[in-house]
Amino acid sequence: MEELIDKAKKGDKEAYTLLIQSLEKDLYCIASVKLNNIEDINDAIQETMLNSYRNIKKLKDPKAFKSWIIKILLNECKKIYARKYKIKELLDKITIICNNKNDDDIRDIEGKIDLEKAIKRLKKEEQLLITLYYLEDLSYIEISRILNINYNTVKTKVLRAKEKLKDIIEKEG
Amino acid sequence: MDKEQNLNQNLNQLDKQLFELYKNKKVPPSTHNAIKQAFNKESKKDIRKYIYRFAIYFISILIITTGVVFAKDIYNFISSFFTNSTDGIDEAINHGYVQNIDMDFVYDKDIGIKVDYLVMDEKNLDISYVYENNKEGKISSISINNYNIRYNNNNILYYENDTNNFNTIVKNYTRTNGLKKYNDNIFCESILYSVDELPNISNLIIEINSVTLNEKDVIEGTWMFNINIEKENIEKDIDTYIVSYNEYIKNITTYLNETTFKIEILLNTDFDEDILFNPDNTILSNKDKKEFIRNSMNFININENGEIFKQIILEYDVSKFSDNIDELKLNLRITKDKVIDLIMKKT
């Protein structure tokens, strides 16, 4: 990774593309927590890639690259969310009220508990913490740096999110 | 196996499932291609996205204005939806202004209640409660009904039935994100207490005397919590703004703290409360024209030298940690024909 970062700093776009591709699962999973459709997720990832490339020379410690790019991604997701989703959510809520729809069932077609859908039942912040922690490589310290949250707070919140998840699965099981 | 061992074993199994879930996650081909094509992407904005965005705004305005009765219902719903914004509190939490409360449920009459976290600044105290129903039968909602909050040596912060005028500090409060349901038994609610001046609080005693189930059944009981406030939460400061002159403004005061931006306005002219009630007539925005959600609006009577004035109190979902807020603009429509524009610069 460090070699690719060095090349990118010298203007090698191909190296940077390879670098981002090595993190594509992480970026996709994190953006999926914040945004609901694939077009917006891809936009957020593209903007993240372009913005981070423009500022790659400012990155002093290559080891911090992953945390750094996740922060940029979260900001991009926030911009897209503010632009599109607040109004859309409002309209969706109106539709739900008018049609008396129930919340989405978290069971899949066979009636089994879908872990992924159970995660969606958590608060957005909890979903994000679960995603960052279980995507491997991200420690509590790294998560605390990315989200600017106290280390102990991260630890508490991840544990709490897990307990909630367990409750959701047990109650619906 | 005791309860704790069982819990730990279940969490370990969940750990394995979660690691496995993310390990096996597949990235859609479109995302892989998006990364591949990023540097070839056109720099000019996608016109389609803007058309979509304006279409959404147009549709929402159409829904609000179509039909008298239906529009009013939708309007009230929209108003309450917007007051449930918690960006300011989220920003404060993300900057460490949160105290997580590590406690077990307190049970009485088969209802468990605990405090989850609290966020405190100069003017607001946000307390998040979790409720657990162990009664038989399905519960659609549960919330605290009658309660008191005291601070430091029994001083009253909030007293539900203040008929004896105990000099409650909290003048008004608003519920922030409303009641949330996790499952049939667990509910969560965050209540924002808004005060004129929050004292230095080192300890809180919350006493809940009754809860309401299904919005109708009142259950009397006693649930008490004694919470010591962490030192970091005690020292707070607020930012203020200098406001441009306007002939209709008698007095205006601003308070920006960790969770909210509060504006208190005394006008020297008549105004229409119904018009001001509409958030579209009280827009707060920054230099980039980003508009901030209005969390609440209240009117209180102020006695000045024997004359009663109605003070307008607006609260917006802005945190002192928010970006680009050195200069803000407040656009107020106070009657059908009168509009006030105020520029506010941070001191």
Image (spheres, coloured by chain):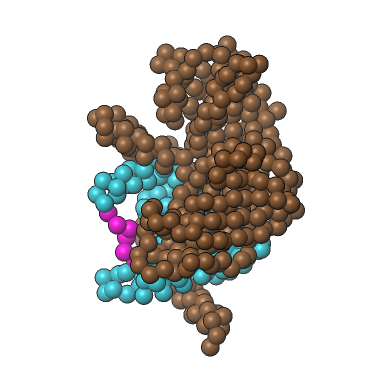
A41 is higher (above) or lower (below) than B74: below
Q: What kind of secondary structure does the magenta stretch mostly adopt? A: loop
Residue A142 on the magenta segment: no
Whether residue B195 can be seen here: no
Q: Which chain is brown?
A: B
Nearer the observer, B122 or A48: B122
**Quadrant position of residue B141:** bottom left
Image coordinates for residue B240, horizontal then vertical, percent: 67, 30
Outermost front residue: B164
Which residue is painted at 71% across and 42% down in the image?
Answer: B199
**Quadrant position of residue A136:** bottom right
The magenta segment is A101-106
Residue A105 on the magenta segment: yes
Which residue is painted at 51% across and 70% down in the image?
Answer: A163
Nearer the observer, B162 or B48: B162
Which residue is painted at 68% across and 37% down in the image?
Answer: B197
Outermost bottom residue: B1
Image coordinates for residue A123, horizontal then vertical, percent: 47, 57
Q: Which chain is cyan?
A: A
Image coordinates for residue B176, horizontal then vertical, percent: 50, 46
